[in-house]
């Protein structure tokens, strides 16, 4: 029996309520649509071009005096000054294998924690966009768990901004290195959405599997990371990883369903643009997200995100016995996690909200 959630019942503040458009964000996202189609922009875009643009503006102007967020955003803005070099010539006589080895060696010099590679696919792109590159290099940066555990306070929001900055710098450095080798390359970085979706290529390159909270779960870091990417014409070889069977775990997990203040996380997969998948209700999530520094409670409270837990969970998923293992062990862990959460986490947060 879950404890009562101190953030519920949640109602968006009147200022935000006045900005909510008539069209549902879930409709734009293709919830309940039976046919596959590319996604359309719903948020993190030019606010004049999206139905929820007024809400997005409100997010950036809410709490303008917050010191932690202001400093983190200033640092991130400085990174956008990075100047990409032109594509150098001539190209080296290397094949995809050499290129991949050298790239994976080079990125150890850069400030990010994970790198993966996958071939470009049409389903990685937003509606009506094109990228004339054959390969996607995915990049991931890890949050400081202590900071992200403060969600939904400003410290967690500032940590997310900082990590998006690091992801941006990593993508720019990687694209610059590839260009200096004679191949075209473009960075694709948050927080605003570009042409490239982040999660589908991240799954394809072996970073992880989609969890019930609509974010990736990785075998080392759980959901405690952010993504950026580089697309390139440099021939590469794909990376991959064995299955983690995250569904077996998420199906029994109730932690963030119960913890999510507006109840945006559904217990079951939903039909979205022709595919059944875990899905976060955009209309419920975004007002709380806006009012609470980008929230991120679902990422912080995912059991896989706790340092040291994901490797243990992902190791113990042998085919055949995995369902029993996950169910039994998850129930035990979920109880322990919940205890800590309610003892130290929500009590503190409630006092500041
Ligand atoms: S980010 Fe959204 S889905 Fe996640 S806990 Fe917060 S309100 Fe819920």
Image (tube, rainbow, N blue to C red):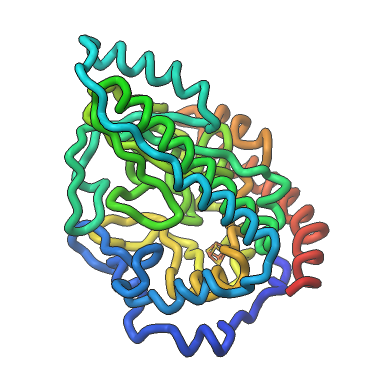
265 displayed left or right of 343: left
Q: Foreground: 96 or 49?
A: 49
70 displayed left or right of 36: right
**x, y percentage for residue 181?**
30, 20
Q: Foreground: 249 or 86?
A: 86
User: Quick check: can you spot residue 247?
Assistant: no
Name the residue rendered at 58%, 85% in the picture: 13
User: Quick check: can you spot residue 228?
Assistant: yes
Q: Quadrant of residue 327?
A: top right
* Residue 181 versus residue 219 in the image, above or below: above
Q: Quarter holding the N terminus?
A: bottom right
**x, y percentage for residue 159?**
63, 51
Q: Quadrant of residue 33?
A: bottom left
Q: Foreground: 326 or 69?
A: 69
Q: Quarter holding the C terminus?
A: bottom right
301 displayed left or right of 197: right
Name the residue rendered at 36%, 56% in the picture: 193
**x, y percentage for residue 153?**
69, 63
Q: Quadrant of residue 23?
A: bottom left
Name the residue rendered at 57%, 32% in the picture: 220
* Residue 17 versus residue 211 in the image, above or below: below
Name the residue rendered at 30%, 11% in the picture: 98
Q: Foreground: 51 or 262?
A: 51
């Amino acid at each position: 029996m879950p404890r009562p959630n101190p953030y519920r019942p949640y109602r968006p503040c009147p200022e935000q309520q006045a900005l909510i458009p008539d069209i549902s964000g879930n409709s734009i996202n293709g919830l309940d649509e039976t046919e596959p189609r590319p996604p359309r922009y719903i948020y993190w875009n030019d606010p004049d071009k999206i139905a929820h643009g007024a809400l997005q503006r409100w997010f950036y102007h809410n709490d303008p005096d917050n010191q932690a967020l202001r400093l983190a955003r200033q640092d991130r803005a400085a990174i956008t000054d990075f100047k990409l070099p032109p594509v150098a010539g001539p190209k080296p006589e290397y094949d995809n294998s050499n290129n991949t080895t050298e790239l994976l060696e080079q990125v150890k010099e850069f400030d990010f924690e994970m790198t993966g590679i996958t071939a470009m696919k049409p389903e990685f792109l937003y509606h009506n966009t094109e990228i004339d590159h054959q390969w996607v290099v995915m990049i991931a940066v890890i949050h400081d768990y202590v900071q992200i555990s403060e969600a939904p306070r400003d410290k967690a929001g500032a940590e997310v901004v900082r990590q998006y900055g690091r992801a941006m710098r990593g993508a720019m450095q990687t694209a610059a290195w590839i260009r200096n080798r004679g191949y075209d390359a473009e960075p694709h970085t948050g927080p605003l959405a570009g042409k490239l979706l982040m999660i589908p290529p991240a799954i394809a390159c072996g970073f992880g599997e989609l969890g019930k909270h609509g974010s990736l779960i990785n075998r080392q870091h759980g959901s405690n990371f952010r993504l950026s990417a580089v697309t390139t014409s440099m021939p590469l070889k794909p990376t991959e990883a064995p299955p983690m069977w995250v569904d077996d775990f998420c199906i029994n997990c109730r932690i963030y369903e119960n913890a999510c203040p507006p109840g945006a996380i559904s217990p079951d997969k939903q039909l979205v643009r022709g595919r059944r998948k875990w899905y976060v209700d955009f209309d419920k999530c975004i007002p709380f997200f806006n009012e609470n520094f980008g929230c991120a409670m679902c990422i912080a409270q995912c059991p896989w995100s706790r340092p040291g837990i994901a490797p243990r969970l992902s190791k113990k998923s042998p085919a055949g016995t995995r369902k029993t293992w996950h169910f039994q062990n998850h129930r035990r862990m979920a109880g322990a996690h919940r205890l800590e959460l309610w003892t130290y986490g929500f009590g503190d947060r409630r006092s500041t909200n």
